[in-house]
Image: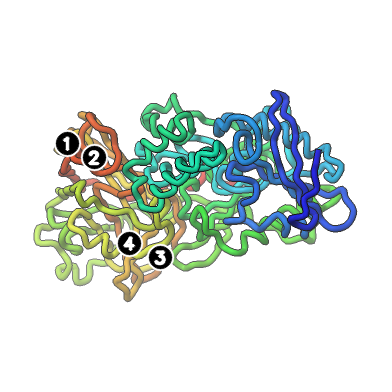
């Protein structure tokens, strides 16, 4: 049943009843003229009025392109009835909504799904018997609640997880009419107090919410974390996947590409200069052409004369340009770390040396550390002034950044190459392998990979990663592997490559207290100073492939 609303031209509100008796509310935007039309569907938890306009064009614009647009409040959010249970509820409701929309008199039966983040997830899940949409455009999303939504390297996403969880808690407070609860959450977020009191606020205002459950689950206990699945025939449908180099869900996008390829699909993946909420302008045109090809052609097949996008397009972070990638095999070679006890204090004491190819040994005596044979680096993490997270995909200030001031800290060890003698393409997941241990029962290794451009001293961060150790194992020397955020960057002759290591990345990840009597969280009196020993003899940097398997 639909009731006309005069707020926007050609807009109406409507609802559908699920098999278990829950009414889901939605808004419809119709094109001018006579239908029926192909439809676009978005299902989201933030109130349908926002319609993902933080990143995507308003539904009114999409209707002007000739699409019937439906934006729905998911169960238990906005004006939809029921209890909001997170990801687990969406498969049944997505299937119900898709069937309802396909039978709508203004829909010609052809449907595309669109949206990012949570709205990307709702596109992917349904029961196996549901007829798939004609195409999907999931952006910045994934199916694994641990790997793609909440954790990295054995550590929870602290700033991101708390901020997102409290946003949902505030929406629930508003839905209950709890004005004081909403204001308390809002003030905590604005003041920064949420970093210390966020878990308590979640326990008080959203005790059964998905975000709190994530924080209460151990990242090391893989079996307790849900891994959702998408129907195979859905994965084989035409798919446009949008990812960003500085988006925390990029691994989920890469995994989705792999799943689609394995199901026999031919997905497009574009990884661009984007954070989670700030995209590049051409994304709108990418979506428009994609939906035109797959929804507005009578046969549903792209017209031979219509422009076709490359299967895999990557934005080069160093050269700031796009490149079509036919073979996403890893690039960048292998590098060896060399350092000493001065690697946290003298930028010349830590070196990054190529293991293959030519080495520039000219004037080497001018830059060698005093003790060239030393290999032990000591990092001291002080919880009173933890090393901060800047830029990247997890910090409060995501995106590209200059990290020279961070690298100048005495609790950050740096390893820098000599100027490159030839261009060097870096592609894939940087993987840092080294031997490390600590004097306390717990420590973190937080890594950053940067480039220092030719004739410059600016340190341009490319990628970051973290690895957490807890318990008695932290006291024993052990070979550890830190996997960083994937990247694409073609370094130029004269550029220098740098690896930076610290014992914290606050508040991207919580502070490791150095023992198991307290949980990881904000700095408090129970957190210990931690000395981390790193034996860089044999330590190396290599690059793992973006996709398994690679594109044919």
Q: Secondary structure at mark 3?
A: strand
Dot in front, 3 or 1: 1
- Which disc, if any, is residue 443? 2
Q: Earlier in the sequence, mark 4 or mark 1?
A: 1
Q: CA distance from mark 4 to mark 1?
A: 31 Å
Instruction: Give the side of residue 239 with respect to residue 362, left or right.
Output: right
17 lies above or below 369 = above
Dot in front, 2 or 3: 2
Q: Which residue is mark 3?
A: 491
Q: What crowding class fits label 2: few (fewer than 14 Cα within 10 Å), some (14-19), or many (20 or more)?
A: many
Mark 2 near mark 4, Cβ–Cβ under 8 Å? no
Q: Which of the two residues, 297 or 514, is positioned nearer the viewer here? A: 514
Q: What crowding class fits label 1: few (fewer than 14 Cα within 10 Å), some (14-19), or many (20 or more)?
A: many
x and y percent of residue 368 in the render?
A: 15, 64
Q: Earlier in the sequence, mark 2 or mark 3?
A: 2
Q: Which of the two residues, 450 or 64, is positioned nearer the viewer here? A: 64
Q: Residue at x 75, y 34 (%)?
A: 16
Q: Which of the two residues, 14 or 137, is positioned nearer the viewer here? A: 14
**Could you tell me how many numbered marks the image carries?**
4
Q: Residue at x 65, y 39 (%)?
A: 79
Q: Earlier in the sequence, mark 2 or mark 4?
A: 2
The quarter of the picture where residue 438 lies is top left
Q: Which residue is mark 4?
A: 497
Q: CA distance from mark 2 to mark 3?
A: 32 Å
x and y percent of residue 179 in the render?
A: 49, 43
Q: Which residue is mark 1?
A: 440
x and y percent of residue 534 in the render?
A: 19, 45
Q: CA distance from mark 4 to mark 3?
A: 8 Å
Q: What crowding class fits label 3: few (fewer than 14 Cα within 10 Å), some (14-19), or many (20 or more)?
A: many
């Amino acid at each position: 049943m639909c009731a006309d609303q005069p707020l926007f031209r050609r807009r109406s509100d409507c609802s559908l009843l699920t098999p278990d008796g829950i009414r889901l509310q939605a808004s419809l935007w119709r094109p001018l003229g006579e239908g029926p039309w192909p439809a676009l569907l978005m299902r989201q938890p933030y109130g349908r009025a926002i319609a993902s306009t933080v990143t995507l064009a308003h539904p009114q614009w999409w209707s002007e392109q000739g699409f019937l647009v439906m934006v729905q409040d998911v169960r238990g959010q906005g004006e939809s009835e029921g209890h909001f249970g997170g990801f687990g509820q969406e498969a049944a409701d997505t299937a119900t909504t898709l069937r309802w929309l396909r039978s709508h008199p203004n829909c010609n039966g052809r449907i595309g799904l669109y949206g990012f983040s949570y709205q990307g997830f709702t596109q992917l899940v349904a029961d196996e018997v549901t007829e798939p949409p004609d195409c999907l455009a999931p952006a910045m999303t994934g199916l694994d609640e641990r790997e793609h939504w909440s954790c990295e390297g054995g550590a929870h996403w602290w700033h991101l997880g708390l901020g997102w969880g409290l946003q949902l808690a505030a929406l629930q407070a508003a839905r209950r009419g709890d004005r004081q609860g909403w204001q308390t959450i809002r003030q905590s977020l604005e003041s920064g107090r949420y970093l210390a009191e966020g878990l308590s606020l979640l326990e008080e205002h959203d005790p059964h919410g998905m975000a709190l459950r994530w924080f209460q689950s151990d990242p090391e206990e893989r079996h307790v974390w849900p891994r959702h699945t998408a129907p195979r025939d859905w994965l084989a449908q035409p798919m446009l996947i949008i990812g960003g180099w500085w988006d925390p869900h990029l691994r989920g996008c890469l995994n989705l590409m792999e799943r689609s390829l394995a199901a026999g699909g031919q997905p497009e993946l574009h990884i661009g200069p984007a954070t989670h909420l700030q995209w590049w302008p051409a994304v709108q045109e990418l979506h428009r052409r994609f939906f035109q090809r797959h929804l507005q052609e009578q046969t549903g097949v792209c017209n031979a004369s219509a422009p076709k996008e490359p299967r895999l397009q990557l934005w080069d972070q160093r050269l700031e340009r796009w490149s079509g990638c036919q073979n996403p095999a890893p690039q960048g070679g292998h590098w060896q770390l060399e350092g000493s006890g001065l690697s946290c204090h003298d930028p010349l004491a830590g070196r990054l040396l190529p293991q293959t190819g030519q080495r520039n040994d000219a004037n080497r005596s001018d830059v060698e550390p005093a003790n060239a044979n030393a290999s032990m680096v000591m990092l001291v993490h002080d919880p009173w002034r933890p090393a901060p997270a800047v830029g990247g995909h997890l910090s409060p200030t995501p995106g590209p950044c200059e990290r020279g001031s961070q690298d100048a800290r005495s609790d950050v060890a740096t390893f820098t190459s000599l100027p490159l003698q030839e261009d060097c393409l870096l592609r894939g997941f940087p993987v840092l392998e080294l031997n490390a241990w600590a004097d306390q029962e717990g420590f973190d290794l937080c890594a950053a990979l940067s480039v220092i451009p030719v004739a410059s001293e600016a340190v341009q961060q490319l990628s970051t990663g973290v690895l957490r150790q807890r318990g008695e194992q932290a006291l024993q020397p052990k070979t550890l592997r830190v996997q960083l955020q994937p990247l694409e960057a073609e370094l130029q002759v004269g550029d220098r490559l740098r690896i930076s290591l610290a014992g914290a990345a606050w508040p991207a990840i919580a502070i490791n207290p150095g023992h198991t009597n307290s949980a990881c969280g904000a700095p408090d009196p129970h957190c210990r100073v931690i000395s981390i020993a790193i034996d860089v003899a044999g330590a190396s940097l290599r690059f793992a492939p973006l996709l398994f398997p690679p594109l044919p």
